[in-house]
Image (spheres, rainbow, N blue to C red):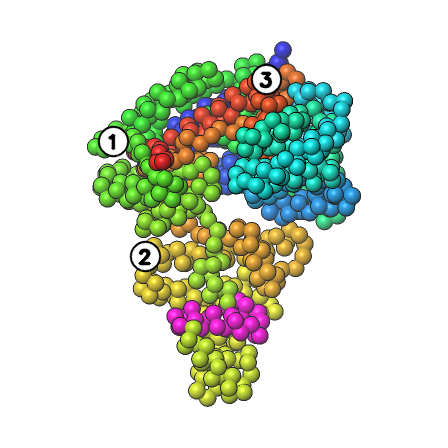
Amino acid sequence: MTTPLNADITFISAGTGSGKTHRLTELLQEELTVRAARPAGVIATTFTRKAAAELRERVRAHLLQQGRFALANAMGQARIGTVNSVCDQLVARFAFEAGLSVEQQVLEEARAALLLDKAIDAVLDEAQLDALLALVERLGLKNSWNGEQEEWKAALQTLVNQIRSNDIPLEQLDDFAKANAGALLAHFPSPADEDLDAALLQAIRVAMPEIEALAAAGDKKNTTAYLALVKDFKRELERKAAPWGTWIKLSKSAPEASLRVTIEPISALASRVAEHPGLHADLRGYLDLMFALAGRALVYYQAVKQEMGMLDFADQEHQLLGILDHPEVVAVLEDELDLLMVDEFQDTSPIQLALFLKLARFAKRVYWVGDIKQAIYGFRGSDTALMQSILAALPALGGRKEVLPASWRSRPELVKLVNAVFSHAFAGTLPPEEVALKPTRDDDLPGAVLANWLLGGKNIGEEGSALAAGVRRLVDSGYLIHDKVHKTMRPMRYGDIALLAASHERVKTWGAALSTQGVPVATARPGLLATPEVTLALACLRRLNDPGDTLASAEIVSLTDSADPEQWVADRLRYLATGAAQDSWREVAIDGHPAHPVLETLRKLRAALPVLAPREALATVMAACALPEKVLRWRSAHGAGADGARMRLANLEALLALAEQYEALCRSGQHAASVSGLILWLGEVAGQGQDLLAEPAIDAVKLMTHHAAKGLEWPVVVLTDLAKDIKDRLWSISAHTSAPFDAHQPLAARFIRYWPWPFGQQQKVAVADEIALTDAAAAFRAAAIEEEKRLLYVSMTRARDLLVLAVMISYP
């Protein structure tokens, strides 16, 4: 039986567009002005820094309007911020009691990820790496589905993250490995007594002469392909290196019909792969090694951070979890903490939930605000099942629930559509009042609220062209939308549209298709360093840093003067013929060769370089060389309009932001920043595809994934990839509670489950089909379907005026 927390807890169910931010602001104002909560006694966590700043400023503005100047001035004492920032403040506040340094050096997230990656590499000695790679090869875990990273390495990083977000003691990892292997192999047949390798090799030797003879005499492609497969498999099997997926492929492959009887023993033996003792041993060995490596990597990572005198966000959460049990800290917080507010409660990680429950014991009033229908970040470590458990236990904890009933965002017809769809979809998990909202908008727009586009094509390129044509026709139609800023109706523009896709790859595909059709597009995509304006800025920085970088000089002359290569190459050759110093071309005036104003400016700035920080050097170059003015002059030459000009200026600002990020990483890593280091680091960023183009406020269609759209809204939303396959996490890594849920100990009995798929690219496998019929598989499938429902809810509720369902129909 769950006992009360002795806390005044209210969970506010805030559906999309129901005025959550307004309600949060209203509650905080009431607590401060009516219930006499002290600003210094307020803790409020939000999902983003922007949301935190908005909440603080809204409350401060309201207090000023009421003439409560002292309270308004004291709002700076309230701990309002992201979970990470609030943890940072509380750890610093109680560092003395916990025996920690008061000056906490926190690793930037990117730097922490890099150090963790290096820790994984460091704990793998050569013998272990060889053993692991051999296992990975046989189990078909070398490459991930998207090709971005080796699957085993991505899995190892996920294991590490799950261990930390669930606060798992490292001594439990060995038991986890064995429990996972045992649970998985319980569905496999018992290991065969006979030597399947030897039997299969013998069957191949017997059949090979006849297969080779027919392959040589005939022209059947299937026989030739089968012969090649058998030869490769035989070679790998003799080396004990044959992937288990190749056994499956061999069992399903066949040559021409006349050989079917000949190859029957091969197929029959290969199909018994699930009985192979080697497969069983590989699965056990792989899981043992992966969980052990995850534990050792964390120990090494912790040691590196301690040596550096630093910690990361997960360390802060773990430290705070322990600090909140300290008697002196408990006494202080029971006296000081008047109000605890948690926004986006449904996206809380397991360890954060434990923190919020501990803090709730001390607070006089607690508000958790969220919407379980928008819990879509399971892939980031949040656990919807855990959140549903705590909400189910809320009455027993002495808490209550409040539902925000109205929708203030969308047209009434759209609200009714969403109500109809999702009242049915969530009928088994949520009561109707937490799904259906009452429409409140009274503006009378004439157009339809729902459009169904059937986009045909023989391939993805033609489908993309059809999608782009649909967007153009929609804008050209003059469809009227409600301008939220000016409170009037007006014809829609490209900037009123958001197009949502299933993946980042799909975003790139649709973006290219729209751009080809002349539809302006705004999306977070790499390529910043390849833009002309950033190329020019970096050429100036390189020339400032290295007077011998003549390639930078050529780029500067070409881009600032819009000069063809023939012009400046000819001038360069004439200059060299004079015998003048090679490095000084156009930097100083020489007979017949005037100094270039930008190169001359850089020469004069070079003396100040030793005292300039990298970002400062970059900003100085941009200002002294008047780069913004120069790139704006490209407007007519390059045929770009005002939006193009804004994009160029925004890209220069994005480059400065990257320079700031580089300096922050240097501070975090406690090593010196330099212009040379910045230039090299920028090259690495571009190589990793992390040099994202700026996204200024221009009239362009916004492209992003369905997940990335959470928290945003647009007049018109186009949904694509609605028919994609649903993938569950049966053959993946996840965490769950392996015992009845205890609201007082939410991290108790947490278990990390990992079943690796051992058959590579092969999908139709008999033993896997049997596993798919189990209760465990059904539970994972049901969870995946529920998550897809929630994602669809998020996507459909982004639209204010028009929702477009873009359905792709492939032509033969």
Residue at image location 69% in from the left, 30% down from the top = 203
Q: Indicate the secondary structure of the residue bearing disc 3.
A: loop
Q: Are marks 1 and 3 in contact (CB under 8 Å)?
A: no
Residue 306 x, y percent position in the rendering = 74, 45
Residue 460 on image: x %, y %: 40, 41
312 vs 776, nearest the viewer: 776
As drawn, the label of residue 642 is 2
Q: Nearer the viewer, mark 2 or mark 1?
A: 1
Distance Cα–Cα, label 2 vs label 1: 32 Å
Query: What amino acid is at disc 1?
Result: Ala
Mark 1: secondary structure: loop
Nearest to the eye among marks 3 and 2: give it. 3
Q: Secondary structure at mark 2?
A: helix
Disc on the earlier residue, 2 or 1: 1
- Indicate which disc residue 774 carries: 3
Question: Eyeballing the image, is 689 above or below 462?
Answer: below
Q: Is residue 548 magenta?
A: yes
Q: Earlier in the sequence, mark 1 or mark 3?
A: 1
Looking at the figure, which quarter contains the C terminus? top left
- Residue 247: x and y, percent? 64, 32
**Image label count:** 3
Q: Label 1: which residue?
A: 448
